[in-house]
Amino acid sequence: MRHAQEPTYSFVILTFVLILINTALAWFSVKIIPAGTGGITLVYIAVAFMILFTLWFGAYGAIAAYVGTLLAGVLTTESLLQHPEIAIIWAVAGLLQVLIPLVAVRMFEVDLTLTNRRDWTIILLFAVLINNIVGAAWGAYTLSLLGPLNIAGAFSTWLVGNIIITILIVPLGLRFFTEKVSRSKLFVGKYWD
């Protein structure tokens, strides 16, 4: 049985590194593959890694997802930079997209190596579908606070792109890398420990 340990500087460094990775991936996604709708990209590669990091590193990954989303948003979208109050609310979309699978995985005691159908189903429902529906709805709505926006178009672009990227990366990342990551002292079995 693993003993709970107090967070150390290792978790601070981990969170900082994850923020940098998430910000870089998000910036890359928005700048390289834009959808023409401010702050939305056709393929948001960062979301899949944010989910993986949160499932492996708990709330530290979730903090990094929120901050990475916020930083990338203000770095890539002029209207979010001009309205930081909306950017702070908008970035909650990234947080929701990682917290939903984290809570589901912990609540249903999913084996992250995905050795059975039940675990695959929970991951597909909560780390690919439900979380992306909620994140796309939140994100599209909050972007509409910046000015005129086709909310349905923004929602569907966000949702479809995220579902495609998360279904390709998240289950495979969990299946093939969880065993190695879980042996690390930085792996978080619950939320903080």
Image (cartoon, rainbow, N blue to C red):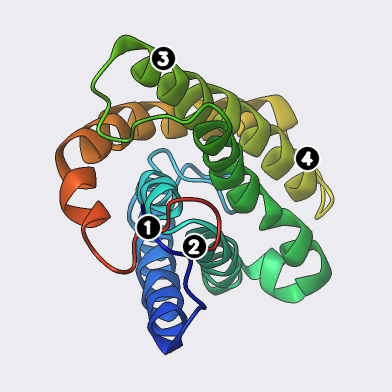
Tag 1 near tag 2, CB within 8 Å: yes
Identify which amino acid the numbered label 4 is placed on: Tyr
The earlier-in-sequence mark between 3 and 2 is 3
Disc 3/disc 2 C-alpha distance (Å): 25 Å
**For discs 3 and 2, the disc positioned in front in the rendered view:** 2
Quadrant for residue 192, please give it: bottom right
Q: Dot 4 corresponds to which residue?
A: 141
Of mark 1 and mark 2, the one earlier in the sequence is 1
Query: Label 2 sits on what residue type?
Result: Asp
**Relative image position of residue 146 (x, y in whole percent):** 80, 55
Query: Does label 2 or label 4 sit earlier along the sequence?
Result: 4
Q: Are marks 2 and 4 in contact (CB under 8 Å)?
A: no
Q: Give the Cα distance between marks 1 and 2.
A: 9 Å
Q: Please state which of the two labelled residues, at mark 1 or mark 3, is closer to the viewer.
A: 1
Name the residue at 61% across, 67% down.
70
Residue wearing tag 3: 121
What residue is pinned by disc 1? Answer: 2
**Other residues around mark 4 within 10 Å, as few (<14) / some (14–19) / many (≥20):** some
CA–CA distance in space, label 4 to label 1: 42 Å
Query: Mark 1, mark 2: which one is toward the viewer?
Result: 1
Q: Find the residue positioned furthest to the bottom.
A: 9
Instruction: Look at 63% across and 35% down and name the residue there.
Output: 136
The earlier-in-sequence mark between 4 and 3 is: 3
Mark 2 highlights which residue? 193
Could you tell whether 187 is left or right of 113 in the image?
Answer: right
Identity of the residue drawn at 45% across and 27% down: 128
Q: Position of residue 77 (x, y in %)?
A: 59, 64
- Find numbered disc 2 in the image and state the secondary structure of the residue it sits on: loop
Tag 4 secondary structure: helix
Mark 2 and mark 4: span between their CA atoms?
34 Å
